[in-house]
Image (cartoon, rainbow, N blue to C red):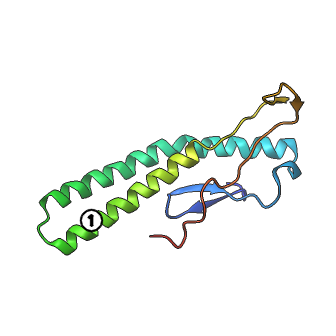
Amino acid sequence: MSTHFIYDERLGIRLPHLEKEWDMYTKEEQAEILLEWETIRGKIPDRIIELEQQINEKQRQLGEENDFALSCMLNSEIASLASMINDLWIWYRMNQTVTNPYINKKGAHTDTFFTLNSPISSHHGRS
């Protein structure tokens, strides 16, 4: 496990944690980071399924719950899980184009292009 990724408790996956600009990494380091990200990224759909199963269970409980306070709590938990799923989809769909040479929209050749910046703001203080 590299130091380029840190575990996010809320989302249940490792997320990019780059300590310098992408262009400051060697091509070999970039390739290693991308390979590791693709491995992590490949696990996101399974994580989403886990969270959807939790939502389904909470919705089942909600359908049987008569206590208003507990119903509100279940609704809040469902909303939190749905927010996590949304954030995971954002990470899954994060823009990454890796070619060498990279051909931009105008047809000009440039070096390898990759942006591994957080597509979402920090959620560490969020419920």
Q: How far across and how far down the image is residue 70, in percent?
A: 21, 71
Tell me the quarter of the picture where residue 73 sits: bottom left
Give the camera-side residue of 61 and 119: 119
The residue at the point 58 percent across, 41 percent down is 93
Q: Circle 1 is placed at which residue position?
A: 74
How many callouts does the rendering have?
1
Residue type at mark 1 is Leu
Q: How far across and how far down the image is residue 87, in percent?
A: 51, 53
Q: How far across and how far down the image is residue 22, in percent?
A: 81, 50
Q: Name the residue furthest front.
A: 106
The residue at the point 25 percent across, 69 percent down is 72
For numbered disc 1, what is the local secondary structure? helix
The residue at the point 43 percent across, 47 percent down is 48
Give the position of the N terminus as an image quadrant: bottom right
Reply above or below: 57 against 92.
Answer: below
Tell me the quarter of the picture where residue 38 sits: top right
Q: How far across and how far down the image is residue 83, in percent?
A: 44, 57
